[in-house]
Amino acid sequence: MDLAPELSKQLDEAARVIVASQHVVALVGAGLSVESGIPPFRGPGGLWTKYGEPDMFGYQRFLEDPKRWWQERITRTPAYQELMEALEGARPNPGHYALKEMEELGFLHHIITQNVDNLHYEAGSRAVTEIHGNYRKLRCIRCNTRWPREEFPITEIPPRCPHCSGLVKSDTVMFGEPIPSDALEECIRQTAMCDCMLLVGTSAVVYPAAGFPVDVKRQGGKLIEVNPMETNLTDLCDVVIRAPAGKALPALVERLRHLSGKS
């Protein structure tokens, strides 16, 4: 792969840091999904730019009238329809497959993804926590049981959990909704063990995820940013790779194979 000298140097340094680390975690943001054709929410071409940003009371409205919320999901607003069509048509890109290879090689121990598109699993990654949920699943808001959408027959609206009778909604986390406790606890556990965090396509503005790299840095860990754009965390990073994940991560895997003798 022909790479610019500066990018090649950045990748070499990143590979050395990863090989020297004990527990590498990737924090993945919307930039990786954009490379698979899923529109961002903010900025040029963003869904919220086009249709308007939701307010912070979506979850409260769901709790107040879950039947109405479900009816709106079934009829689909234009913004929701466009997002669902993009999600359903998306496929993993080379960045997803490179993360899967890093896991198989033993260099990547966990992925914390802010994306809801299921593409990490489609690419073959296994150690994944979806902090904002998965659009292909439903979840009970009381006991956090999850089901694939197609395996949960909806016989009433709103549907109820067969285990605890709690309300069932999409697994994706809404504005104003707490992060599911099991997902948040796993993110905190992985961050506590992490001595190198790979920041892939994340703008680092959405909390609590944006706080995990800061925690890693405070505990003496390294940060590697893979992003064509500068972010709020760039100044904290030990290595900055200014390239899209789909280009940078496969090249990083090549270097990891070479350094470890696994090529």
Image (cartoon, rainbow, N blue to C red):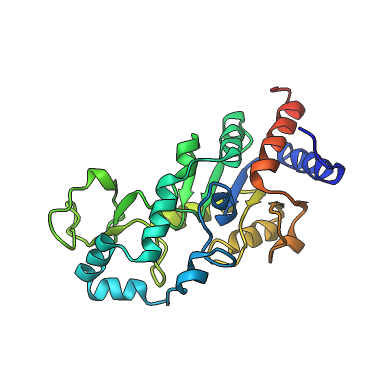
Residue 218 falls left or right of residue 83? right
Horizontal arrangement in the rendering, residue 263 relative to residue 172 (left or right): right
Q: Is residue 92 above or below residue 34?
A: above
**Image coordinates for residue 207, horizontal then vertical, percent:** 54, 67
Kindly identify the residue that appears in the image at 37 percent across and 62 percent down.
80
**Residue at point 59%, 54% (across, down):** 31
Q: Quadrant of residue 180?
A: bottom left
In percent of width and height, residue 184 lies at 46, 58
Q: Residue furthest left?
A: 155
223 or 44: nearer the eye? 44
Where 112 falls versus 47 (above or below)? above
Residue 20 at x, y percent in the picture: 74, 38
**Residue 168 on image: x %, y %:** 24, 59
Front residue of 75 and 25: 75
Residue 195 visible to the viewer: no
Residue 92 vs residue 108, the one in the foreground:
92
Query: Residue 151 occupies which quadrant of the picture?
Result: top left
* Quarter in which the C terminus is drawn: top right
